[in-house]
Amino acid sequence: NWEGKVLVNKGWTWYADNKFNDKYGLITNNSAGESHVAISLTGGKNGLVEISYVISYENFGRGFAWVDDSQDNTKQGLCKKVLHLCKMDKGNDATWRTEKRVACQRNVDGAEMVSILNGIWKVEASVQTVTLLREKLPHGQQKYLHVCLTPPEKSQRG
C-alpha cells in the first residue's frame, strides 16, 4: 500500500482537484515553503526514480525533489527560499534550458544534487509531466524521496 510509504507529510493532502474529481494526487496550497513530504522508496530492477506532477499556467509553483538516507527534511532552509530556475551552463550537464523543459537538476548546498520541479508554464492548460531524478537506487536499497514546495517569485502568476 503506497499510503504506508508516506512517512512524513507536512501540508499535503490526497484528493482529486479536477472538474470530474477523477485525477488524484498529493496537493498542497502552502506557498510559504512549509510543505514537505517524505516517501519511502526501495530500488527496483533499473533503479530509476520517476516523479509525475501537473503543470499549469496559474496557481502552481515550483519545488525541490531529492533522495537521501533520512526521512527528515534535511533541506528545510532551501524549501523556504524563492526558487529560481536553472540557467543553461554548457560546462555543467546538470543544468537544462528551462524554456523548453519543466524540470532541471542542479547542485545546491554544496555538492548535493536536487531536482527542481517547475509547475508553471505559459500555455493556458494543465497537463501531466514526468521527470527522472539523476540519482538511482540500487536494487533492494531503501531511501527516501522528498518533495517540498517553495515560495513563489514575484513575477510568478498565481
Image: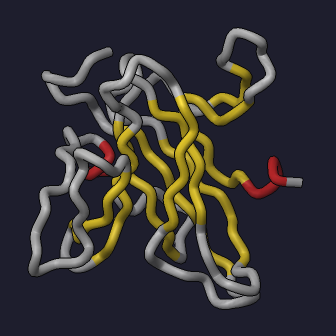
Residue at position x 25%, y 67% from top?
A: 106
Total labels: the figure holds 0
Give the image's coloring scheme: secondary structure
Residue at position x 30%, y 76% from top?
A: 112
Q: In this view, does 70 lie to the left or right of 114?
A: right
Q: Give x and y (percent) for residue 43.
A: 70, 80
Quadrant assignment, res 47: bottom right
Residue furthest to the top in view is 19
- 2 or 128, nearer to the observer: 128
The answer to whether any part of residue 10 appears in the image is: no
Q: Give x and y (percent) for residue 115.
A: 38, 60
Quadrant assignment, res 97: bottom left
Where is 38 relative to 90, above or below? above
Where is 56 relative to 93, above or below? above
Rendered-image quadrant of the N terminus: bottom right
Residue at position x 36%, y 47% from top?
A: 102
